[in-house]
Image (tube, rainbow, N blue to C red):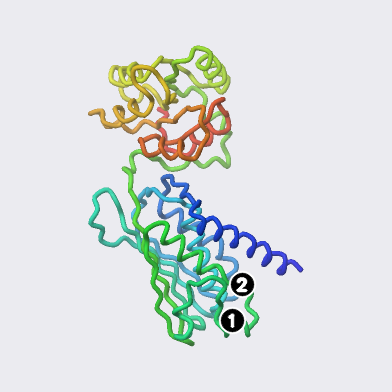
Amino acid sequence: MVKARNLLLSIINNVLDMAWIESGKLELDENYFQAGTILKEVYEVFDSKAKSKNIDFTYEMNVNHEYILCDKTKVQEILINLVSNAIKFTPEGGKVILKTSKISCDQEGFSKIKTEVIDNGIGIGKDYLPTLFDSFTRERNTTVGKVAGTGLGMSIVKKLVNVMNGSIEVETELGKGTKFTLVLQHKVVDNNLFLTKTDMSLVDEQQILQGKHVLLAEDNDLNAEIAITILEDMGLIVERVEDGIRCVAKMEQMPAKSYDLILMDIQMPRMDGYKATQTIRQLSNKDKTTIPIIALTANAFEEDRKKAVAQGMNGHISKPIDVDKIEKVDNKYKISYS
């Protein structure tokens, strides 16, 4: 009963995914993530499953901790489909390898990452290969063998790869195994903009925020008063400026590391939050350019969050301020708290 229910849920989710893709309404929810984390999390999902089948499941990470701009969920959805099939169609005692490496990329500021999923399982017949990525197609040796599946997984993989302007290739031999090679190109970011996540398992998040200095750029007096009250209740020390020009001036005048974080309103007179962020990112002092900046806006639409990230901001919070979101963004980046 549980297997049947899970399969039904999988079919429903896959059909919904396919509907969004084919309608052209699927949008990538891109943000910066560490390439190694994406791979490791996929490995951890299947580690116990592989062990239960006595499969030697290994992963190799050959990308030097680059932060890449991507839709983490969609990238992992691709990899989960590939790894799931590899483990599903590899007999007990077999071997599955998840391997990622950088390859040559001609476009400056971008990185091409190649991920291979290799198994020594049952392989794929040559007659089935032409329809491998079609919807609702499954090879006869999997249906006869009563291996559960939706018939949509590989089609979704191919369509997601296309949405990301990537490529996927397959090499296989019946009875010997299969290798899928996924290549995706991502924008990369200076690692100095991001810090290692703090281990929060033993530390209270509220204590982490105590005494941190925040520069608040907000032109509306009432909004500023509300924000300052909330932030000070969290133990933060807040200094306010009324527009983007004053925010940039403060960053230029004050010594580096005077502030741990900037909360930047988007719509301000004289200079808006986007322009102020761009200007700060171009300051000559490297320690000042890497300060985390969080957008504050009344708009909660996905395109607003994407624009904030594209303009060099590290996060996006909709007004009214959500304390939990500040803590999450604050803890996501390695902010110098000295």
Query: Residues at badges 2 and 1 in contact (C-beta under 8 Å)?
Result: yes
Measured as percent of width and height from the top left, residue 191 is found at 34, 43
Dot 2 surroundings within 10 Å: few (below 14), some, or many (20 or more)?
some
Residue kind at label 1, given as amino acid type: Thr
Query: Looking at the image, which is closer to me, 250 or 158?
Result: 158
For image coordinates 40% across by 32% down, the residue present is: 292
Between residue 149 and residue 53, name the one nearer to us.
Answer: 149
**Which residue bears the numbered disc 2?**
149
Residue at point 47%, 27% (across, down): 296
Residue lying at 50% horizontally and 16% vertically, measured from the top left: 224
Residue 159, percent from left and from top: 46, 63
Q: Which residue is mark 1?
A: 142
Residue sticking out furthest to the top: 221
- Residue 174 against residue 70 in the figure, above or below: below
Distance, label 2 to label 1, CA atoms, is 9 Å
86 up-or-down from 106: above or below? below
Please report the residue visible at 37 percent of the width from the left and 65 percent of the height from the top: 167
Q: Residue 180: name its quadrant.
A: bottom left
Residue 127 screen position, x and y as percent: 47, 86
Given the image, on which type of amino acid does mark 2 rest? Gly
Q: Is residue 236 left or right of residue 69?
A: right
Residue 253 has which mark? none
Please, is residue 167 above or below residue 307 in the view? Answer: below
Question: Secondary structure under badge 2?
Answer: loop
Bin the neighbour count of mark 1 within 10 Å (Cα to Cα): few under 14, some 14-19, many 20 and up. some
Screen quadrant of the N terminus: bottom right
Describe residue 209's horizontal placement relative to residue 99 as left or right: right
